[in-house]
Amino acid sequence: MNAETQLHWKQEKEQVHSSRPIRLLILLVSSLPPWMVNILVFPVAFFYFICSKRGRTEAVLYQKQFIAYTNGKRFKLPHPYLQILSFSLCILEKIEGWSGKIALDEILFQHDDIDELKTQLMEGTGALLIGSHLGNIELCRSLASFNRTGINRAVPVIAIMDVEATEQFNKTINNMNPDVSVNIVNPADIGVDTMSRLIEHTQKGGLVVIAADRTSASVPERSFEEPFLGRPALFPYGPFLIAALLNVPTYFVFAMRKGNAMIFPKYNMYIKKADVTFDCSRPERENRIRILCRLFVKELEKYCIKYPFQWYNFYNFWAMPETDSGR
């Protein structure tokens, strides 16, 4: 295995080196019907597919593992263009979301734990939402920024996310809608004061959102090793520790495009309440943190199998460090 496939996700260079493509997309989103912009994404994705060896290589790496795990039941040969196209559409969806172009009626909620979450929020109780880079979890934040939640009050959201890996993209989107960078917490900056702020935020009925499928950029060794699509992979300890410290109801969230490529897209929103609480002793808390991680990984794998081309971790997800890791 070469050095490139051993890179930590934070070491991968941002693909958007210039703000011009994103600015052009923003202009198109603001001036053209959504279906027309969606059509234009197809040739752009094909150009990226042809020119980006890294994008093709990493898509094939993931898809080969997927095929091996599923015995080829979903597809038998890698289709890297479909994954790159899906990712391109996801970028467009983020722009449309933060432009206010995605309405709540485009989100298809399932018969799961959404009603319990909505009731909880309407009663003024906050929650932790754990998502991933499968699908587009930013739909939750962008809808909330326009008060499109189906809740009878504004629901403030704090996102815990590392924005440096996509700094150019985030800066450009922030120029379009300053709400993008409002209430973002860098995970490396979380300390006692930050946790106090997050606890107060949830006590006042707010949401905290975090992705839990990438190991920490600052302390990657603080991780759990769990089987994922047939091979051991590392998952971060931090998001599940935050769940324990917040001690509020935790939900796994997956926002998925109904199809891989749709001119008039709809989105399936899955909400699953985690059956783990943290009113327990400290030793037991560590055990429950591990259980919460394991439950998340099972949900992640389930929706990855259901929506295989909406996987946007473009690096070797199964790369292991030279030294032993895991808690």
Image (spheres, rainbow, N blue to C red):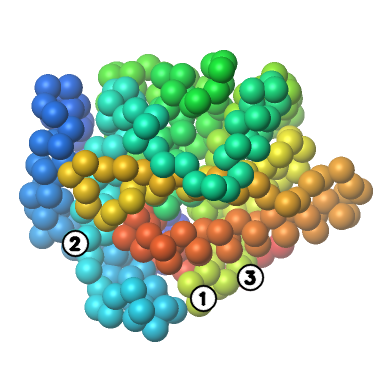
Q: Amino acid at mark 1?
A: Arg
Q: Quadrant of residue 119?
A: top right
Q: Secondary structure at mark 1?
A: strand
Q: Between label 2 and label 1, give the one nearer the viewer.
A: 2
Q: Quadrant of residue 304?
A: bottom left
3 horizontally vs 50: left or right: right
Q: Which residue is mark 3?
A: 324
Quarter holding the C terminus is bottom right
The residue that appears at 57% across and 72% down in the rendered structure is 227
| Marks 1 and 3 close (CB-CB < 8 Å) | no
The residue that appears at 23% across and 65% down in the rendered structure is 80
Q: Which residue is mark 1?
A: 231
Looking at the image, is 178 positioned above or below residue 318? Answer: above
Q: Residue furthest right?
A: 281
Tell me the CA gap for discs 1 and 3. 16 Å
Decide which of tag 2 and tag 3 comes sooner along the chain: 2
Q: Between label 1 and label 3, give the one nearer the viewer.
A: 1
Give the image location of residue 204, x and y in percent: 70, 19
100 horizontally vs 10: left or right: left
Tell me the CA gap for discs 2 and 3. 35 Å
Q: Quadrant of residue 175?
A: top left
Q: Which residue is mark 2?
A: 81
Decide which of tag 1 and tag 3 comes sooner along the chain: 1
Looking at the image, is 124 positioned above or below residue 232? Answer: above
Is residue 158 among the parts visible in the rendering?
yes
Decide which of tag 2 and tag 1 comes sooner along the chain: 2
Few, some or many residues within 10 Å of mark 1 (<14, 14–19, 20+):
few
Q: Secondary structure at mark 2?
A: helix
199 horizontally vs 21: left or right: right
